[in-house]
Image (spheres, rainbow, N blue to C red):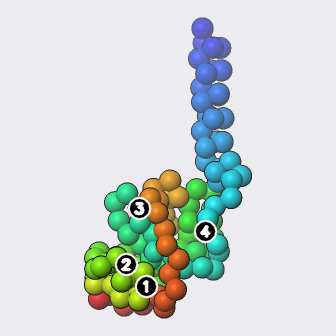
Amino acid sequence: MKTQLIEKLLEAMLNEKEKSEPWNGAELPFAVGKTYFIRTVTYHLLGKVDSIKGNFLVLSDASWIANSGRFGKAIKDGDLDEVEFCGDAIVSITSVCDAFPWMHELPKETK
């Protein structure tokens, strides 16, 4: 009985390890050095991808976007209503709903 429990725990841990590897080797639609407007399930971030570590995007020059204003205009013109610069950020890839290439300078100040 005890051996079966240990085997089940080990199997669960191995399955969890596979989940923690970056999408089990699948290619991600993010490029290191590129900037993105990222919408997650609870917030929006803007920043440059410095690296991809496991299931996390490591961003630099990142800002939390409290209010993008008209979204299409924000993506097209780079015009954002409310921005809070935060510097470095780490975001879980599993929380990303969608992302858009950001073709404008990254904001460096809170607005």
Q: Earlier in the sequence, mark 3 or mark 4?
A: 4
The answer, for residue 97, to whether it is visible in the render is yes
Whether label 3 touches label 1, CB < 8 Å: no
Q: Do the residues labelled 1 and 4 touch (CB within 8 Å)?
A: no
Looking at the picture, which amino acid does disc 2 mark? Answer: Gly
Disc nearer the start of the sequence (3/1): 3
2 to 110, vertically: above or below: above
Q: Marks 3 and 2, how far apart in space? A: 17 Å
Badge 1: residue crowd in 10 Å (few <14, some 14–19, many ≥20) = few
In the drawing, what numbered circle is on residue 40?
Answer: 3
The CA distance from mark 1 to mark 4 is 19 Å
Give the numbered dot on residue 30: 4
Between 103 and 48, the one nearer to me in the picture: 103
The quadrant the C terminus occupies is: bottom left
Front-lying residue, 70 or 97: 70
Residue 84 showing in the rendered view? no
Q: Which of 98 and 5 is in front in this view?
A: 98
- Residue labelled with disc 2: 72
Residue found 35% across the figure and 88% down from its top = 79
Name the residue carrying label 1.
76
Q: Distance between the residues labelled 3 and 4?
A: 15 Å
Q: Nearer the viewer, mark 3 or mark 1?
A: 1
Amino acid type at mark 4 = Phe
How many residues crowd around disc 2 within 10 Å: few (fewer than 14), some, or many (20 or more)?
Answer: few
Q: Which of marks 2 and 4 is in front?
A: 2
| Tag 3 near tag 4, CB within 8 Å | no
Q: Position of residue 80 (x, y in %)?
A: 33, 85
Disc number placed over residue 3 in the picture, else none: none
Type of residue at label 1? Answer: Lys
Q: Which of marks 2 and 4 is nearer the N terminus?
A: 4
Q: Which amino acid does label 3 sit on?
A: Thr
Cα gap from disc 3 to disc 1, whole angstroms: 20 Å
